[in-house]
């Protein structure tokens, strides 16, 4: 099952059952003294089995293996708590480590949902099934924190850390300047669009994400190793497509608000989503949640650019277009 994508760099496909992402790409880099595993999968049996089978084939000794996790999402981080040994170093970033430690972050999310117009009763009953809850890392993890321009040397490779906030607050890519390889996590994906969500009123992740795309655009990249789906080569072209996608999305939000004020949930219900259901009401709960989170990120982006304006009506935030005179 392991596919050698470059000398001593192997891709393991870790299945994500019942999830539209289908699988996570875990990368195993074999070095002479230590190995490095980049991203791991959920803390779930199917992921563990695939990881162990792959590592057996590659004859990787976990006692000589360290980990680099691109961001806090459970499909990247979850399994590390089960496979790291007491000699393993787990490299991670500070903003996402802080969010993991913050016990109130789920509560803030639940409290913000009704502000966006999202049906609170649906949220409460479904939340315990959230993969972040069920398959996230267990217990306390001791991280070795990396920052911009820090390096990880492994075998013949010397990876440089590139901070790419947006998909999460602390998302981090790795760049190998000699081989011109980008380990992209969920920053740039080829066949699907990385999800940019917001569930608060005090951040602007879409603005950060677009800035991180511009930052990576300047790198000379010949091979992208993404967190999901296929490996690809043309990073600049993909970045342009992703930027175009978000521009189109922002225009769509604006044109929906030009027809009248709405809360985020109402805007999301009128957007065109790339999903095969006849109506918004038939969308599965999780799709509605992701769609609403993505809409909130676009609303915040437009609001900061003063193209729309926000008003508080009762508990809810309502948005309207700033129409030109
Ligand atoms: Zn992610």
Image (cartoon, grey):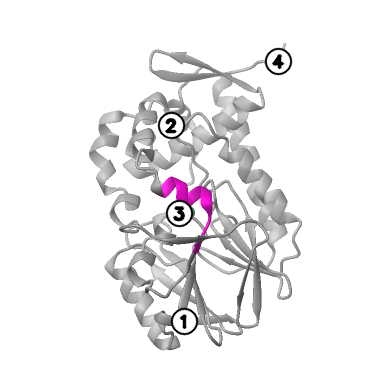
In space, the residues marked 4 and 2 are separated at their CA atoms by 25 Å
Residue 156 image offset from top left, x and y in percent? 65, 82
Give the foreground label among 4 and 3: 3
Residue at image position (60%, 60%) is: 173
Tag 2 residue: 269
Q: Nearer the viewer, mark 3 or mark 2?
A: 3
Residue marked by disc 4: 324
Is residue 1 among what the camera can see?
no
Residue at disc 1, CB closer than 8 Å to ligand 1: no
Q: Position of residue 226 (x, y in %)?
A: 56, 64
Task: Give the mark, 1 or 4, whose residue is nearer the N terminus.
Answer: 1
| Residue 222 image offset from top left, x and y in percent | 71, 70
Q: Note whether residue 32 is visible.
A: yes
Q: Are marks 4 and 3 in contact (CB under 8 Å)?
A: no
Residue range corresponding to the magenta coloring: 91-100
Which badge, 2 or 1, is on the more N-terminal residue?
1
**Mark 2 Cα within 10 Å, few/some/many (few <14, many 20+)?**
some
Residue designated by label 1? 2
- Which residue is depicted at the point 65% across and 38% down? 247
Q: In terms of image quadrants, where is residue 86?
A: bottom left
User: In the image shown, does 96 or 175 lie closer to the viewer?
Assistant: 96
Separation of residues labelled 1 and 3 (CA atoms): 24 Å
Mark 1 or 3, nearer chain start: 1
């Amino acid at each position: 099952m392991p596919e050698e994508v470059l000398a001593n760099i192997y891709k393991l496909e870790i299945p994500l059952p019942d999830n539209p992402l289908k699988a996570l790409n875990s990368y195993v880099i074999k070095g002479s003294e230590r190995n490095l595993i980049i991203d791991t999968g959920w803390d779930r049996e199917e992921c563990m089995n695939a990881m162990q089978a792959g590592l057996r084939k590659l004859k990787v000794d976990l006692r000589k293996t360290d980990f680099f996790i691109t961001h806090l999402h459970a499909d990247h981080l979850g399994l590390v708590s089960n496979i790291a040994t007491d000699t393993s170093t787990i490299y991670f970033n500070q903003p996402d480590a802080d969010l993991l430690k913050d016990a109130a972050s789920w509560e803030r999310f639940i409290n913000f949902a009704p502000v966006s117009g999202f049906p609170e009763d649906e949220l409460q009953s479904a939340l315990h099934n959230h993969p972040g809850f069920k398959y996230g890392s267990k217990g306390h993890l001791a991280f070795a924190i990396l920052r911009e321009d820090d390096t990880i040397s492994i075998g013949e490779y010397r990876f440089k850390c590139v901070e790419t906030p947006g998909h999460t607050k602390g998302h981090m890519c790795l760049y190998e300047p000699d081989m011109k390889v980008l380990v992209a996590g969920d920053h740039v994906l080829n066949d699907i669009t990385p999800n940019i969500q917001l569930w608060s009123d005090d951040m602007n992740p879409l603005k950060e994400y677009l800035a991180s795309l511009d930052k990576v655009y300047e790198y000379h990249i010949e091979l992208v190793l993404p967190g999901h789906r296929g490996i690809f080569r043309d990073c600049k072209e993909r970045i342009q497509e992703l930027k175009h996608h978000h521009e189109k999305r922002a225009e769509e939000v604006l044109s929906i608000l030009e027809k009248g004020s709405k809360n985020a949930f109402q805007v999301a219900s009128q957007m065109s989503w790339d999903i095969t259901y006849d109506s918004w009401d038939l969308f599965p709960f999780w799709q509605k949640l992701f769609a609403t989170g993505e809409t909130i990120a676009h609303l915040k982006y437009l609001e900061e650019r003063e193209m729309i304006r926000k008003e508080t009506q009762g508990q809810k935030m309502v948005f309207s277009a700033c129409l030109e005179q």
